[in-house]
Amino acid sequence: MKLPFCKYHGAGNDFIIIDNLSGQYHLSDSQISALCHRRFGIGADGLMLLGHAGAPWSYAMDFFNSDGTRGTMCGNGGRCLVAFADFLGIENHYFTAIDGTHQGFLLERKDNYSKVQLGLNDVQGLRHYQKDSYLLDTGSMHLVRFIPDVKAVDMATEGPYWRHHSDFGKQGVNVNFVEILDKGCLFVRTFERGVEDETWACGTGSTAAAIAALEYTGNGLNHWHIQTKGGNLEVSYQKTGTLFTNVFLTGGAVRVFEGVVEI
Protein backbone atom coordinates (compact mmCIF):
# COMPACT_ATOMS: atom_id res chain seq x y z
CA MET A 1 0.00 0.00 0.00
CA LYS A 2 1.25 3.47 -0.89
CA LEU A 3 0.91 5.91 2.02
CA PRO A 4 1.08 9.68 1.36
CA PHE A 5 2.50 11.68 4.28
CA CYS A 6 3.94 15.00 5.38
CA LYS A 7 6.86 15.51 7.74
CA TYR A 8 6.60 18.42 10.20
CA HIS A 9 8.60 19.65 13.15
CA GLY A 10 7.86 22.01 16.01
CA ALA A 11 11.11 23.26 17.59
CA GLY A 12 12.84 20.09 16.38
CA ASN A 13 10.14 17.80 17.77
CA ASP A 14 9.31 15.97 14.51
CA PHE A 15 6.26 14.09 13.30
CA ILE A 16 4.90 12.09 10.40
CA ILE A 17 1.37 13.33 9.63
CA ILE A 18 -1.18 11.52 7.47
CA ASP A 19 -4.46 12.79 6.06
CA ASN A 20 -6.95 10.14 7.19
CA LEU A 21 -10.18 12.09 6.78
CA SER A 22 -11.40 9.26 4.56
CA GLY A 23 -10.70 6.72 7.33
CA GLN A 24 -8.89 4.39 4.93
CA TYR A 25 -5.62 4.02 6.86
CA HIS A 26 -5.29 1.62 9.79
CA LEU A 27 -1.66 1.26 10.82
CA SER A 28 -0.30 -1.40 13.14
CA ASP A 29 2.12 -0.72 15.99
CA SER A 30 4.93 -2.33 13.99
CA GLN A 31 4.17 -0.24 10.88
CA ILE A 32 4.19 2.97 12.91
CA SER A 33 7.42 2.01 14.63
CA ALA A 34 9.03 1.20 11.27
CA LEU A 35 7.93 4.52 9.74
CA CYS A 36 9.33 6.45 12.71
CA HIS A 37 12.66 4.59 12.70
CA ARG A 38 15.49 7.04 12.01
CA ARG A 39 17.69 4.53 10.16
CA PHE A 40 15.20 2.41 8.23
CA GLY A 41 12.12 4.63 8.00
CA ILE A 42 11.12 8.25 7.54
CA GLY A 43 12.25 9.11 11.07
CA ALA A 44 10.15 10.93 13.66
CA ASP A 45 9.37 11.35 17.35
CA GLY A 46 5.77 10.36 16.62
CA LEU A 47 3.08 9.80 14.02
CA MET A 48 -0.34 11.44 13.73
CA LEU A 49 -3.45 10.64 11.74
CA LEU A 50 -5.69 13.62 11.00
CA GLY A 51 -9.08 11.96 11.09
CA HIS A 52 -12.73 12.80 10.71
CA ALA A 53 -14.68 14.09 13.72
CA GLY A 54 -18.36 14.87 13.91
CA ALA A 55 -19.76 18.35 14.48
CA PRO A 56 -18.85 20.69 16.09
CA TRP A 57 -15.23 19.54 15.72
CA SER A 58 -13.17 20.18 12.60
CA TYR A 59 -11.07 16.99 12.82
CA ALA A 60 -9.54 14.47 15.21
CA MET A 61 -5.93 14.03 16.33
CA ASP A 62 -4.82 10.41 16.65
CA PHE A 63 -1.28 10.41 18.04
CA PHE A 64 1.21 7.53 18.32
CA ASN A 65 4.63 7.42 19.93
CA SER A 66 7.64 6.43 17.83
CA ASP A 67 7.57 2.93 19.35
CA GLY A 68 4.07 2.42 17.91
CA THR A 69 2.15 2.79 21.16
CA ARG A 70 -0.77 5.17 21.41
CA GLY A 71 0.41 8.39 23.02
CA THR A 72 -1.03 10.87 25.46
CA MET A 73 -1.48 14.52 24.41
CA CYS A 74 1.41 16.01 22.45
CA GLY A 75 1.60 19.81 22.43
CA ASN A 76 4.07 20.30 19.60
CA GLY A 77 2.29 17.54 17.68
CA GLY A 78 -1.00 19.37 18.11
CA ARG A 79 0.54 22.58 16.79
CA CYS A 80 1.99 20.74 13.78
CA LEU A 81 -1.38 19.11 13.14
CA VAL A 82 -3.03 22.54 13.04
CA ALA A 83 -0.45 23.69 10.47
CA PHE A 84 -1.05 20.52 8.42
CA ALA A 85 -4.83 21.00 8.55
CA ASP A 86 -4.33 24.56 7.32
CA PHE A 87 -2.14 23.16 4.50
CA LEU A 88 -5.08 20.90 3.54
CA GLY A 89 -7.36 23.95 3.37
CA ILE A 90 -9.15 23.47 6.69
CA GLU A 91 -9.92 26.88 8.21
CA ASN A 92 -11.25 26.08 11.68
CA HIS A 93 -9.07 24.23 14.16
CA TYR A 94 -11.35 22.97 16.90
CA PHE A 95 -10.31 19.34 17.21
CA THR A 96 -10.53 16.32 19.46
CA ALA A 97 -7.57 14.49 21.02
CA ILE A 98 -7.08 11.74 23.56
CA ASP A 99 -7.39 14.22 26.45
CA GLY A 100 -10.40 16.15 25.14
CA THR A 101 -10.92 19.10 22.80
CA HIS A 102 -8.43 21.77 21.73
CA GLN A 103 -8.48 24.99 19.75
CA GLY A 104 -5.61 26.00 17.49
CA PHE A 105 -4.88 29.42 16.00
CA LEU A 106 -2.73 30.32 12.99
CA LEU A 107 -0.89 33.48 14.01
CA GLU A 108 1.46 33.62 11.03
CA ARG A 109 2.01 31.75 7.78
CA LYS A 110 4.91 32.11 5.34
CA ASP A 111 5.97 29.43 2.85
CA ASN A 112 6.46 26.21 4.85
CA TYR A 113 6.51 28.00 8.24
CA SER A 114 3.48 28.59 10.45
CA LYS A 115 3.31 30.14 13.89
CA VAL A 116 0.66 28.25 15.82
CA GLN A 117 -0.92 28.87 19.20
CA LEU A 118 -2.55 25.82 20.78
CA GLY A 119 -4.96 25.83 23.70
CA LEU A 120 -4.29 23.08 26.22
CA ASN A 121 -6.61 21.79 28.92
CA ASP A 122 -6.90 23.36 32.36
CA VAL A 123 -4.26 22.08 34.76
CA GLN A 124 -4.89 21.23 38.38
CA GLY A 125 -3.00 19.10 40.86
CA LEU A 126 0.50 20.59 40.73
CA ARG A 127 2.32 18.63 43.41
CA HIS A 128 5.67 19.19 45.08
CA TYR A 129 7.57 15.92 44.69
CA GLN A 130 11.05 16.43 46.10
CA LYS A 131 13.38 19.36 46.66
CA ASP A 132 13.22 21.49 43.50
CA SER A 133 10.91 18.95 41.79
CA TYR A 134 7.22 18.95 40.86
CA LEU A 135 4.66 16.59 39.31
CA LEU A 136 1.76 17.69 37.12
CA ASP A 137 -0.41 16.59 34.20
CA THR A 138 -0.55 18.91 31.17
CA GLY A 139 -2.18 16.33 28.92
CA SER A 140 0.75 14.00 29.68
CA MET A 141 2.23 13.36 33.11
CA HIS A 142 5.47 15.24 33.73
CA LEU A 143 8.17 15.41 36.36
CA VAL A 144 9.84 18.84 36.43
CA ARG A 145 13.27 19.11 38.07
CA PHE A 146 14.88 22.55 38.50
CA ILE A 147 18.66 22.39 38.29
CA PRO A 148 21.48 24.96 37.97
CA ASP A 149 23.01 23.72 34.68
CA VAL A 150 20.71 21.87 32.31
CA LYS A 151 23.37 21.39 29.65
CA ALA A 152 25.45 19.33 32.08
CA VAL A 153 22.74 16.70 32.61
CA ASP A 154 23.68 13.19 31.48
CA MET A 155 20.37 12.42 29.78
CA ALA A 156 21.38 8.85 28.93
CA THR A 157 21.58 8.10 32.66
CA GLU A 158 19.29 10.59 34.39
CA GLY A 159 16.48 10.37 31.84
CA PRO A 160 15.78 6.63 32.11
CA TYR A 161 16.35 6.66 35.88
CA TRP A 162 13.50 9.11 36.53
CA ARG A 163 11.31 7.96 33.62
CA HIS A 164 11.14 4.43 35.13
CA HIS A 165 11.34 5.39 38.81
CA SER A 166 9.13 3.18 40.98
CA ASP A 167 7.39 6.25 42.44
CA PHE A 168 5.60 6.73 39.09
CA GLY A 169 4.19 3.25 38.63
CA LYS A 170 4.12 1.02 35.58
CA GLN A 171 3.47 3.82 33.08
CA GLY A 172 6.34 5.94 34.33
CA VAL A 173 6.64 9.65 33.64
CA ASN A 174 8.09 12.18 31.20
CA VAL A 175 11.11 13.92 32.72
CA ASN A 176 12.00 17.61 32.31
CA PHE A 177 15.26 19.19 33.48
CA VAL A 178 14.82 22.95 33.76
CA GLU A 179 17.24 25.83 34.22
CA ILE A 180 16.08 29.37 34.95
CA LEU A 181 18.03 31.57 32.53
CA ASP A 182 16.45 34.91 33.33
CA LYS A 183 13.21 36.31 34.64
CA GLY A 184 10.50 34.66 32.55
CA CYS A 185 12.96 32.54 30.55
CA LEU A 186 13.65 28.81 30.97
CA PHE A 187 15.85 26.23 29.27
CA VAL A 188 14.08 22.85 29.14
CA ARG A 189 15.39 19.38 28.20
CA THR A 190 12.92 16.48 28.14
CA PHE A 191 13.23 12.71 28.17
CA GLU A 192 9.97 11.36 26.72
CA ARG A 193 8.05 8.16 27.27
CA GLY A 194 7.33 6.28 24.03
CA VAL A 195 10.34 7.84 22.35
CA GLU A 196 12.54 6.57 25.21
CA ASP A 197 15.08 9.24 24.53
CA GLU A 198 15.61 12.97 24.76
CA THR A 199 13.58 14.90 22.22
CA TRP A 200 14.69 18.28 20.91
CA ALA A 201 11.58 19.87 22.41
CA CYS A 202 8.41 18.81 24.21
CA GLY A 203 5.30 20.99 24.18
CA THR A 204 3.48 19.54 27.17
CA GLY A 205 6.84 19.33 28.98
CA SER A 206 7.59 22.99 28.32
CA THR A 207 4.09 23.83 29.54
CA ALA A 208 4.65 21.78 32.69
CA ALA A 209 7.98 23.53 33.26
CA ALA A 210 6.41 26.99 32.91
CA ILE A 211 3.58 26.19 35.33
CA ALA A 212 5.97 24.64 37.86
CA ALA A 213 8.28 27.65 37.50
CA LEU A 214 5.57 29.93 38.88
CA GLU A 215 5.45 27.81 42.03
CA TYR A 216 9.23 27.42 42.22
CA THR A 217 10.15 31.09 41.74
CA GLY A 218 7.09 32.77 43.25
CA ASN A 219 7.61 35.64 40.79
CA GLY A 220 3.96 35.84 39.71
CA LEU A 221 4.68 35.57 35.99
CA ASN A 222 2.12 33.94 33.71
CA HIS A 223 4.02 34.20 30.42
CA TRP A 224 7.27 32.30 29.89
CA HIS A 225 9.80 32.06 27.08
CA ILE A 226 11.14 28.54 26.68
CA GLN A 227 14.43 27.61 25.07
CA THR A 228 14.91 24.01 23.91
CA LYS A 229 17.56 22.20 21.87
CA GLY A 230 15.40 22.59 18.77
CA GLY A 231 14.05 26.13 19.11
CA ASN A 232 11.95 28.53 21.13
CA LEU A 233 8.43 28.21 22.51
CA GLU A 234 6.14 30.37 24.61
CA VAL A 235 3.74 29.32 27.36
CA SER A 236 1.06 31.48 28.95
CA TYR A 237 -1.72 30.81 31.45
CA GLN A 238 -3.93 32.27 34.17
CA LYS A 239 -3.93 31.00 37.74
CA THR A 240 -6.96 31.07 40.03
CA GLY A 241 -6.32 29.34 43.34
CA THR A 242 -4.82 25.98 42.43
CA LEU A 243 -6.32 25.94 38.91
CA PHE A 244 -4.41 26.99 35.78
CA THR A 245 -6.70 28.06 32.93
CA ASN A 246 -6.28 29.66 29.49
CA VAL A 247 -3.16 27.55 28.98
CA PHE A 248 -1.55 28.28 25.60
CA LEU A 249 1.53 26.86 23.88
CA THR A 250 2.90 28.97 21.00
CA GLY A 251 5.70 28.41 18.52
CA GLY A 252 6.69 27.55 14.99
CA ALA A 253 5.48 24.54 13.01
CA VAL A 254 7.48 23.75 9.89
CA ARG A 255 6.52 21.54 6.94
CA VAL A 256 9.81 19.79 6.16
CA PHE A 257 8.80 17.64 3.19
CA GLU A 258 6.04 15.44 1.80
CA GLY A 259 6.15 12.12 0.04
CA VAL A 260 4.73 8.66 -0.48
CA VAL A 261 6.03 5.55 1.27
CA GLU A 262 5.28 1.90 0.56
CA ILE A 263 4.09 -0.08 3.60
Image: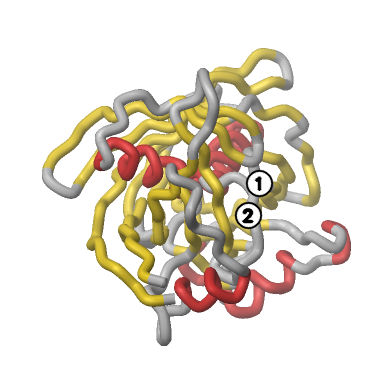
Residue 59 placed where, x, y %? 47, 34
The image shows residue 111, relative to residue 92, as above or below, that is below
- Disc 2 is placed on an element classified as loop
Q: Residues within 10 Å of mark 1 (few under 14, many from 20)?
A: some
Instruction: Indicate how the structure is coloured in the image.
Output: secondary structure
Say the numbered circle drawn on residue 32: none
- Residue at 40% of width from left, 44% of height from top? 81
Q: Is residue 43 visible?
A: yes
Q: Residue furthest top?
A: 240
Badge 2 amino acid: Gly
- Residue at 25% of width from left, 41% of height from top? 87
Q: Earlier in the sequence, mark 1 or mark 2?
A: 2
Q: Which residue is mark 2?
A: 71
- Residue at 39% of width from left, 49% of height from top? 19
Say the numbered circle drawn on residue 140: 1
Residue 196 placed where, x, y %? 61, 71
* Cβ atoms at labels 1 and 2 below 8 Å apart: yes
The quarter of the image holding the C terminus is bottom left
The image shows residue 216, relative to residue 255, as above or below, that is above
The quarter of the image holding the N terminus is bottom left
Left or right placement of residue 134 versus residue 36 in this view: right
Question: Is residue 161 or residue 24 the one in the foreground?
Answer: 24
Q: Residue furthest bottom?
A: 39
Question: Is residue 151 or residue 61 the one in the foreground?
Answer: 61
- Residue at 31% of width from left, 31% of height from top? 90
Q: Residue furthest left?
A: 111
- Disc 1 is placed on an element classified as loop
The part of the image, by quadrant, that contains residue 230 is bottom left
